[in-house]
Image (spheres, rainbow, N blue to C red):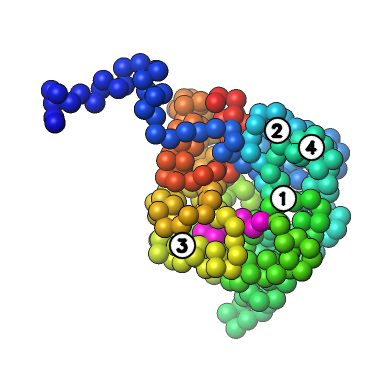
């Protein structure tokens, strides 16, 4: 039946009608809030390229956790800025590493029971060279050596589980890391700790501001030998399939906005819980437009998040988590 019998505008007439026929929901419980933990006390140091985002000392992280729990945000994703870096990235797996300290402190707070505490598993924030794995010299200059890195990632995941991480989230893009982490967790008595794998992670210009926030820019070269080429959808699905075979319980895809087709294709192909990461560049781009008065802040935040949900993400990692939760 077509016009005039069919009039699509009938169901758009009122707020209540629009709410009744809304296809996609967005709830604070769909959101994960990323935090950057740094040494010190009472530290809240702003990130220049990410207005509203801070490097936070452990006590401040606990405050953020309590606030997030009150707002019914689903969980936190923790990144660490260690006091010192070295070639191997030992700060990543130290029992008293910065993320481990934060996990223990949050676990002792009332927020812990209401939040899923996710620890990012990678080495780039802890290595002096800023790469996500072990760097060796090669004919072409240098190489990020896959297999020796697996053991370090596995140690990192185990130490995070010991400190209280509810979920570990490897973001390094080494081959075989999920299996290595699963084996190490099981061996250390953490058979019940799930792995959220950044299975589909593209080498993206949109990570720029994060590197300031996490102080993790590579000192030489780039990450294109381990993160994926932005042109490849089939490869992304293959990465996801392999990570699931290795034992990933959930998958994370990043960035979100320039890769919504990947989120959609993954949603159609796989039945596991999946999230997308609205990365730093997506956030900063919107913030810049808000500062200029070019976009309506509240509406643009929610629209950017609903788009990611509509593409098929069950949950979204976003720096807008608190602001969005207030609006919902
Ligand atoms: Zn990394």
Residue 220 in percent (x, y) is at 63, 66
Q: At 63% from the left edge and 81% from the top edge, which residue is drawn?
A: 138
Q: CA distance from mark 2 to mark 4?
A: 10 Å
Q: Earlier in the sequence, mark 4 or mark 3?
A: 4
Q: Tell me the SS state at disc 2.
A: helix
* Most distant residue in the top direction: 14
Q: Residues within 10 Å of mark 2 (few under 14, many from 20)?
A: many
Q: At 77% from the left edge and 56% from the top edge, which residue is drawn?
A: 161
Residue 292 in percent (x, y) is at 50, 28
Q: CA distance from mark 2 to mark 1?
A: 15 Å
Please say if the residues under marks 2 and 1 sit with CB atoms less than 8 Å apart: no
Residue 236 is marked as: 3
Nearest to viewer (mark 3 / mark 1): 1
Q: Earlier in the sequence, mark 2 or mark 3?
A: 2
Q: Which residue is mark 1?
A: 166
Q: Quadrant of residue 322?
A: top right
Residue 286 in percent (x, y) is at 50, 35
Q: Which residue is mark 4?
A: 62
Vertical comparison of 62 with 93: above or below: above
Please say if the residues under marks 1 and 4 sit with CB atoms less than 8 Å apart: no
Vertical comparison of 120 with 156: above or below: above
Residue 69 is marked as: 2
**Region rendered in magenta:** 194-201
- Residue 133 at least partly seen: no
């Amino acid at each position: 039946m077509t016009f005039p019998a069919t009039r699509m505008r009938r169901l758009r007439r009122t707020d209540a009608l629009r709410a009744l026929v809304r296809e996609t929901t967005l709830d604070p419980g769909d959101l994960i809030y990323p935090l950057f933990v740094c040494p010190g006390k009472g530290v809240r140091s702003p990130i220049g390229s990410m207005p509203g985002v801070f490097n936070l000392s452990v006590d401040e992280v606990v405050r953020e956790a309590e606030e997030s729990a009150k707002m019914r945000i689903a969980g936190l994703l923790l990144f660490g800025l260690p006091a010192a870096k070295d070639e191997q990235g030992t700060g990543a797996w130290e029992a008293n590493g910065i993320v481990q300290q934060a996990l223990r402190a949050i676990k002792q707070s009332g927020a812990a029971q209401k939040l899923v505490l996710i620890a990012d598993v990678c080495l780039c924030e802890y290595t002096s060279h800023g790469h996500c794995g072990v760097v060796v010299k090669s004919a072409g200059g240098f190489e990020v050596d896959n297999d020796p890195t697996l053991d370090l990632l596995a140690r990192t995941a185990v130490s995070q589980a010991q400190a209280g991480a509810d979920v570990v989230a490897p973001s390094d893009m080494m081959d075989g890391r999920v299996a290595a982490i699963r084996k190490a967790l099981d061996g250390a008595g953490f058979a019940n700790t799930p792995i959220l794998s950044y299975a589909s992670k593209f080498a993206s210009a949109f990570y720029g501001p994060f590197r300031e926030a996490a102080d993790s820019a590579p000192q030489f070269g780039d990450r294109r030998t381990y993160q994926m080429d932005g042109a490849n959808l089939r490869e992304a699905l293959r990465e996801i399939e392999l990570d699931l075979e290795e034992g990933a319980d959930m998958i994370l895809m990043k960035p979100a906005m320039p890769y919504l087709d990947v989120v959609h294709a993954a949603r159609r192909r796989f039945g596991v819980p999946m999230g997308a990461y609205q990365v730093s560049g997506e956030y900063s781009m919107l913030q810049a437009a808000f500062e200029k008065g070019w976009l309506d802040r509240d509406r643009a935040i929610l629209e950017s998040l609903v788009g990611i949900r509509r593409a098929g993400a069950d949950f979204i990692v976003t720096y807008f988590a608190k602001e969005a939760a207030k609006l919902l």
